[in-house]
Amino acid sequence: MPDAPVLLVVDDHPQGRDLIEGELRKRYGGDYQVIRAGSADNPLGQLARLRDGRRLVAMVLAGEGTAGTAGTELLARVGEFHQTARRLLLTDGGFGPPSEPILRAIALGHIDAYAARPVTVPDERFHLAVTELLEEWARSHRPRFEVVRVVGEEWSARSHEIRDLMDRNSVPFGFYPASTDEGQALLQQAGAGAALPVIILFDGRALVNPANTEIAEALGLKTRPGGGLYDVAVIGAGPAGLAAAVYGASEGLSTVLLEPEAIGGQAGTSSHIRNYLGFPMGVSGEDLAVRAYTQAWNFGAEYVYGSPATGLRVQGRERVVTVAGGSEVRSRAVIIATGVSYRRLGIPSLDALIGVGVFYGAATSEAKAMRDQEVFVVGGANSAGQAAVHLARYAARVTVLVRGRSLAEGMSEYLVKEISGTPNIAVRHNVAVTDGGGVGRLERLTLRDRLTGVSQTVPASAVFVLIGAEPRTQWLPDAIARDQWGFVITGSDLPGGGPRPENWPLGRPPMFLESSLPGVFAAGDVRRGSIKRVASAVGEGSIAIRLVHDYLQDSDSSSRM
Ligand SMILES: Cc1cc2nc3c(=O)[nH]c(=O)nc-3n(C[C@H](O)[C@H](O)[C@H](O)COP(=O)(O)OP(=O)(O)OC[C@H]3O[C@@H](n4cnc5c(N)ncnc54)[C@H](O)[C@@H]3O)c2cc1C
């Protein structure tokens, strides 16, 4: 198999290495070339030779205790030679928690996973770890059936938008720049004229510069709600909305889920969610979203893609959601799960490193891994201050980057004092992040002094971006109370508080998660006081369904009276 992608095994444990090599050859020998080495064979040199010979390395498996270089150190350098190779650290197993170097390697993105060396033949747990990583690798390196082929200008905004939507919605696609021979051949085959982009479907149909809803319809997705009355309409298919759809449909409620962009919401944009229960090595937001979406679908939830909700009104006992494009959804109860848009830096080189050194939010689970590292926090509000103080317990130095002249403009005094009293926190004012990069992980940031215009590139292991988030609630009517930032107020937090908030029309108090409009609930990040985590959004989505049951029961019994 001289040209097959390589699985490189580096281990100094002679018996272990034989066993690993044997297991890999047996299972993957038909499709991959297995190469083995010890640290005496200069594995970095081997990686360089494979690179120079234009060989594709799919995975490097390195033993934890590899002499010369520790496995973690070797794997940390794989990206210098083969940027997309997956990296699996092999340990001796045991029941204790992973060692600190392993924890640090995970958090800094130096390894993709760790697994115990195989002990039995076959060792299915070992193979599971290998197969999962190979499946991830193969998605972008092995030929796949392209459900959609997109021909467009490489640098046009619409081409980018379509690629992004395909990616976030897990549609297997290929992009062909119109300037290439392949792109031109596809355009000719499809009989398309000069207008771009062109979407060519697996069955040969061609759509010229289509709207998102046209693409969705062509792929068989529903883009308009059915005409009947639903028990519950869930607005937004992030973690909160997906959980509500799964629980609603599984508990017998007729459930419709509206989503204008992509399943998974913000979580779907995260390359690596490490703190969601049940995924010890983390899970990609895309995987989590696709699993949840399939689950909701299997239970019978109806998914309507492509247009945002634009309004909500009460019509007798019904709640009517208006949707862009003119359609309406009639429902007995509504769950608002439209989340927030985290303000992004909007720097593509940094967005490409989200989860491997670039973190949106406090990402407190990463703090321990920042031991002795050079860390940056962007933002001048309390959340940024708290993150800086927490990170300073571990990092060699934390630099807070503030656009304004002083921290006191946006941060509580106690935090400003705490920061100035912490020796390893520095604050830089009037500064903006303009660029950054690294091989496989963040290594540097470019900062511009906003007063002098002078730019400087500094080494950085991690940057935590906390520059605010905006709830997506502009479409809601005034009848739904919101706080000054636009978050939906629910339950006992409603203005007037207590059992009878202002303008509350019912004899009973509003339920937890119920908005100021009875029968309309809010779940996840869009709700005032929410925790802004995947798990809490999922929790609130499922609790909201329990409350919808209570609400429907209540309204059924009052209509019988
Ligand atoms: C880059 C990144 C990484 C993160 N990593 C982690 C992590 O590792 N761990 C963790 O716990 N949390 C993480 N978070 C936070 C977590 O993703 C959010 O707390 C979670 O996604 C909130 O879920 P949600 O369903 O409430 O809202 P969202 O995820 O914001 O989903 C809301 C959905 O509503 C849709 N929508 C908006 N307006 C409308 C409308 N008018 N009509 C219909 N639909 C609409 C949106 O398109 C979106 O799909 C991360 C966030 C980001 C941005």
Image (cartoon, grey):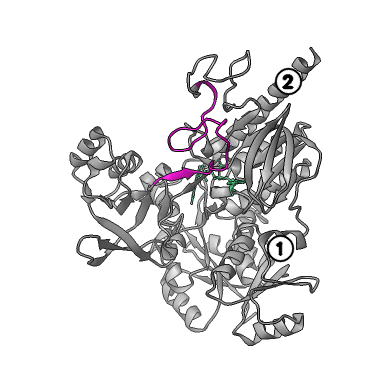
Of 244 and 51, which appears nearest the observer? Answer: 244
Q: Is residue 236 visible?
A: no
Q: Earlier in the sequence, mark 2 or mark 1?
A: 1
**Quadrant hosting residue 347:** bottom left
The residue range painted magenta reads 468-492
495 to 274, vertically: above or below: above
Asked if labels 1 and 2 touch by Cβ distance under 8 angstroms, the answer is: no
Q: Amino acid at mark 1?
A: Ile
**Which quadrant of the rendered structure holds the N terminus?**
bottom right
Q: Residues within 10 Å of mark 2 (few under 14, many from 20)?
A: some
Give the number of marks.
2
Percent across and percent down for residue 181 are 64, 87
Residue at figure coordinates x 60%, y 74% from the top left = 5
The image's mark for residue 215 is: 1
Q: Amino acid at mark 2?
A: Ser
Residue at figure coordinates x 66%, y 27% from the top left = 519
**Which quadrant of the rendered structure holds the C terminus?**
top right
Q: Residues within 10 Å of mark 1 (few under 14, many from 20)?
A: many
479 to 361, vertically: above or below: above
Pick out the residue farthest to the bottom: 181
Of helix, strand and loop, which one carries label 2?
A: helix
Q: Identify residue for label 2.
A: 555
